[in-house]
Amino acid sequence: MTSSRRERILEAGETLMSQRGFHAVSMREIAREAGANLGSVTYHFGTKENLLAEIYARHTVPMNRRRMELLVEAERISDRRERLSAIIRAFVVPAFSASADSAGGGARFTRLRAILSMEGNETAGRIIADAFDETTHAFVEALGRCLPGADEAFITWRLHFLLGALYYTLVGGERINRLTAGRCDGNDQQAAIEQLVSATADSLACDGAAGNPRAA
Amino acid sequence: MTSSRRERILEAGETLMSQRGFHAVSMREIAREAGANLGSVTYHFGTKENLLAEIYARHTVPMNRRRMELLVEAERISDRRERLSAIIRAFVVPAFSASADSAGGGARFTRLRAILSMEGNETAGRIIADAFDETTHAFVEALGRCLPGADEAFITWRLHFLLGALYYTLVGGERINRLTAGRCDGNDQQAAIEQLVSATADSLACDGAAGNPRAA
DNA sequence: GGACAATTTGTACAATCGTACAAATTGTCG
DNA sequence: CGACAATTTGTACGATTGTACAAATTGTCC
């Protein structure tokens, strides 16, 4: 195995940073979690920023590819309402999918993106803008073909809200448990996906909408 | 003036932490930003955690009061669709209102809540759960009276998404500018409020909704 | 097996962290 | 003014941080 140590360090860094952010996790903690020596971490990655960059690098490409695959599939659906939901699902599912399936997405990486975008991490911000903006545009256009008459700004805002809701759900799932007194599981990813998809589909498709230009 | 120094330290801490989170900001940085000595910070607040707790403390009560005031006003509206929007607005507006108007809410404090909830900060989490869950429940119930037939879980999920979208918009407004190539200003708070309110109202009220139990 | 590269280990460094505290200063009240 | 409390200042402490590097170990190819 080519450097399983290196892989374990990447995973440890991803796990810890996705839970507590960039600054709250130390290199020594990452090393310990990975069962490696501190020196090995700097040997493989040089700096902490660099480690973060490599964590991002191995996820962005597979995750965007998965998204685009699902988007292409979704666009083949003729019924507009069904297609709308499928497109949104194509956006959401890769962000949740179990971390087991290769490095393509996964809830852990999405949680990392959430935290670092909130912390205003520069390294992460640069990578994300480069890697995801293009894909996001493809989704805006696909949604536009589903919703004739809706302008780009309207769709972009709602897709932006979807990402925010997705981030928050992934990070603060226990809040749902608390608020519903346990009648609802915020950490049930399947349920979260369904709720996110249906809520976004409704917000985009509702005809009597106040914010929907088609109603004007 | 009773200890304007103390006040300036609170403000400096709030400003810096709302931009970069808890761990990325040092006590010395806060002191410098406030034009105070490091010793003064520990004199007034003891520990860093304590400073954070006091930042929260002076905001939660006025902000919740403002929310409840606006909620009571909103509930007087008879037209259901109008009332729905007004209730959502009562939830959103205090989170955005300029930091100038006393300590009641303000975008800066909301951004702080966003970052710390993502970082999983314990101090913040405890305070937030204590201070906001009750108010959130009041909103869920008010929305329930607007939407007969919709169950509590449905409403709670969508209100949860609203909070996530709100957080993300407050933190990453420039993303909207980037994605719309400047045709839309993500930092225009008035526009953001309108978009948040209309999107949430649509997601809650849409009758043909896939996730809406009333459609079943 | 021996030579050379890749990797791991252990340790050290300067910098910065949160906190503590004595001394100096400022404010307050009789 | 004088006494006492409140606040500010300056400095020091031990701990932890990210990074660097020489020595030891492991792997690889001839």
Image: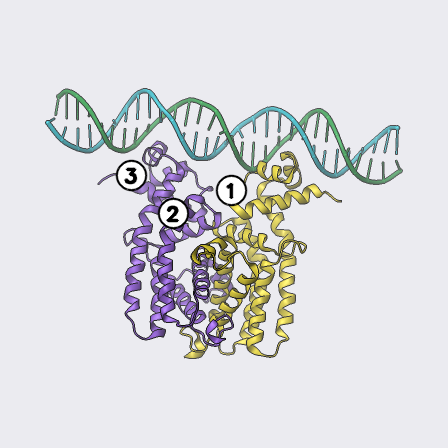
Chain colours: A yellow, B purple, C cyan, D green
Residue B77 position within the rendered picture, expressed as x and y whole percent measured from the top left = 29, 72
**Which residue has dot 1 on it?**
A23
Query: In the picture, which quadrant includes the N terminus of chain A?
Result: top right
**Which residue has dot 2 on it?**
B127
Q: Is residue A21 visible?
A: no
Q: Foreground residue, B198 or B99?
A: B198
Q: Foreground residue, B146 or A135?
A: B146
Q: Residue at x 60, y 66 (%)?
A: A90
Task: Say yes or no: labels 2 and 1 on the same chain.
Answer: no
Task: Say yes or no: labels 3 and 1 on the same chain.
Answer: no
Q: Residue at x 36, y 47 (%)?
A: B56
Return the chain for callout 2. Answer: B
Please, what is the three-letter code of the amino acid marked with disc 1?
His
Return the chain for callout 1. Answer: A
In the rendered structure, are the residues bearing label 2 and label 1 in contact, judged by CB atoms less than 8 Å apart? no
**Gap between marks 2 and 1, in whole Å?**
22 Å
Q: Residue at x 26, y 40 (%)?
A: B4
Label 2 SS: helix
Binning the other alpha carbons within 10 Å of mark 3 as few (below 14), some (14 to 19) or many (20 upward) gives: some
Q: Is residue A216 above or below residue A108?
A: below
**Which residue has dot 3 on it?**
B5
Label 1 SS: loop
Foreground tag (2 vs 1): 2
Label 3 SS: helix
Residue C13 position within the rendered picture, expressed as x and y whole percent measured from the top left = 56, 26
